């Protein structure tokens, strides 16, 4: 989709990024990647591949700090080797992992040397000097909301939505620094740019609980119930910025509300919402793969 | 923890209000205390501010999972301060943390509690305490192909969607890079079936 494209200058410069995918997207959330690539292409944001990328390391931070850092540094090193200066990350977990690792490597020479030794087997060098950005950050900070607005051909005025910001896209803010966790103004504006009506709600900051699905599933389901019951009946869709949050709500809802189907709320990746507003064909936004029925939303946008 | 009986610590515990942010440690005996424990935790990555905790309980009040925990995040911090090594490392609480970073974000003392929890989990694995089986599963998969899932089946769907194929990382490469990490320890110890006492309440 991206090979051979000529990068164009829009907003504050040259929009060329290496795309980091991670584990969850290829296994469960290919609709996020499809819609993200479609939106990027339509906005002339050039996306290149990171050959040989692997797990970002985040789940292993719990087991071994060095295992996490080695995996994260490996991916940073591969991207750097392919002459990339910026990585665009779709997953908030991968984003937090790679960004934290880049700062850790630059902040501690001994740690960097130690990780470099491990990466020698692939001829790679640990180095944190590469910009790690979430796609929401690419769109807001680099591309600019006013430039996105120019591409919104079909404002979604009949659509009421709520956002689930998710945790790692803003916290810990001392490290991430992209948006305010208490009031994510940039994420709000990105949604408002689509023309949809943004609805606020009480449990907005509640974590999706994805990390404990495999440890204590009833606890994660209780979190899904609290969040969805809070927005059910008030919005047409819940908008996510992370494939793991998306998978948690989109998959768990089917079970949690199996006998209360009227409570189910469609969950859209932000890039699906933006793609609809840009008038991109539904087939290029991966809606076939959404689990909670989103056809009602498509009806409102046609 | 042992049931309540006489002693200074138990008096203190009884006088405290019985809600989620008060300690459920009824009785502490000298043999349960490891006076080096907090020092050890503070020397681990991002553990350095643990000394500063003044027990305000913002962490527990911010935690989305606290209702399901055996000890609240504030209690775990208190237990680290006291030096209750075994109780902390065998607690189910540390594995229920969803790593949302809300406690870290809001701590008025700058304690990076989410990462202190990570430090404790690292230590628990190092010392052979039981970790949830999901980590063993992810670790085993990681050493096979560099991801936490099997990627063989995904490329058909990706090709149909026009997405590039996901390629496995060579086993020898990933094994060499992760040599000496606790992922191996986690897998190895499971095989031997030897585990220290743990309180995984499922």
Image: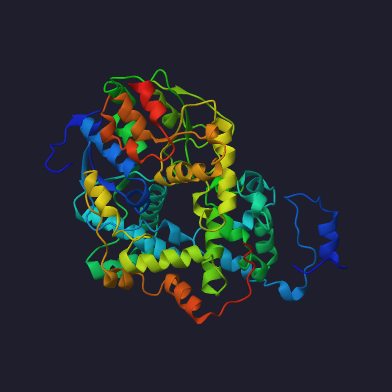
**Residue A64 against residue A7 in the figure, above or below:** below
Q: Which residue: 32% across, 54% down?
A: A128
**Residue B128 against residue A271 in the figure, above or below:** below
Question: Can you give x and y, in whole percent of width and height, for residue B21 in the image?
Answer: 72, 50
Question: Can you give x and y, in whole percent of width and height, for residue A81 in the image?
Answer: 20, 56
Q: Which residue: 43% across, 40% down?
A: A177
Q: Which residue: 31% across, 68% down?
A: B174
Question: Can you give x and y, in whole percent of width and height, for residue B131 in the image?
Answer: 54, 67
Instruction: Examine the rendering and report whether any part of residue A185 can be seen.
Output: yes
Name the residue nearer the viewer: A250 or B102.
A250
Q: Quadrant of the C terminus of chain B?
A: bottom right
Query: How does the figure colour the protein chain or chains?
Result: rainbow
Name the residue nearer the viewer: A241 or B74.
A241
Instruction: Examine the rendering and report whether any part of residue A190 can be seen.
Output: no
Residue placed furthest toward the front? A259
Would you identify the image quadrant in which residue A123 lies?
bottom left
């Amino acid at each position: 989709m991206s090979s051979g494209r000529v990068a164009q200058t829009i907003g504050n410069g040259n929009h060329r990024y290496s795309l980091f995918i991670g584990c969850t997207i290829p296994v469960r959330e290919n609709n996020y990647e499809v819609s993200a690539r479609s939106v990027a292409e339509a906005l002339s944001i050039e996306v290149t591949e990171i050959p040989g990328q692997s797990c970002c390391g985040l789940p292993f931070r719990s087991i071994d700090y060095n295992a996490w850092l080695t995996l994260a540094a490996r991916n940073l090193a591969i991207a750097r080797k392919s002459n990339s200066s910026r990585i665009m990350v779709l997953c908030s977990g991968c984003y937090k992992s790679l960004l934290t690792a880049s700062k850790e490597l630059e902040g501690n020479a001994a740690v960097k040397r130690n990780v470099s030794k491990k990466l020698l087997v692939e001829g790679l060098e640990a180095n944190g000097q590469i910009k790690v950005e979430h796609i929401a950050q690419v769109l807001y900070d680099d591309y600019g909301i006013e430039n996105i607005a120019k591409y919104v051909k079909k404002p979604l005025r009949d659509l009421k939505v709520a956002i689930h910001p998710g945790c790692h896209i803003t916290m810990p803010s001392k490290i991430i620094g992209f948006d305010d966790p208490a009031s994510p103004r940039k994420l709000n504006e990105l949604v408002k740019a689509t023309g949809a009506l943004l609805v606020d709600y009480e449990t907005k900051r509640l974590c999706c609980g994805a990390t404990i699905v495999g440890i204590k599933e009833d606890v994660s389901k209780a979190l899904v119930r609290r969040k969805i019951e809070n927005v059910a009946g008030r919005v047409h869709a819940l908008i996510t910025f992370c494939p793991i949050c998306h998978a948690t709500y989109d998959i768990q809802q089917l079970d949690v509300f199996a006998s209360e189907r009227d409570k189910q709320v469609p969950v859209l990746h932000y890039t699906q919402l933006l793609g609809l507003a840009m008038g991109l064909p539904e087939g290029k936004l991966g809606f076939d793969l959404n689990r909670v029925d989103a056809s009602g939303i498509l009806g409102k946008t046609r | 923890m042992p049931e309540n009986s006489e002693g200074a610590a138990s008096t203190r515990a009884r006088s405290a209000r019985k809600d989620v942010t008060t300690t459920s440690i009824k009785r502490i005996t000298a043999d349960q205390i490891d006076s080096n424990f907090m020092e050890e935790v503070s020397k681990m990555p991002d553990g350095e501010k643990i000394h500063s905790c003044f027990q305000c309980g913002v962490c527990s009040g911010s935690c989305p999972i606290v209702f399901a925990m055996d000890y609240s995040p504030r209690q775990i911090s208190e237990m680290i301060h006291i030096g209750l090594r075994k109780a902390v490392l065998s607690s189910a609480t540390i594995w229920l943390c969803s790593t949302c970073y809300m406690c870290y974000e809001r701590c008025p003392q700058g304690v990076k509690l989410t990462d202190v929890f990570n430090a404790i989990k690292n230590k628990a694995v190092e010392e052979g305490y039981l970790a949830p089986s999901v980590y063993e599963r992810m670790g085993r998969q990681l050493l096979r192909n560099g991801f936490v899932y099997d990627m063989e089946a995904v490329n058909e769907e990706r090709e149909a969607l026009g997405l590039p194929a996901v390629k496995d990382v060579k086993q020898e490469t990933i094994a060499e890079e992760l040599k000496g990490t606790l992922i191996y320890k986690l897998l190895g110890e499971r095989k031997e079936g030897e585990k220290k006492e743990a309180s995984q309440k499922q």
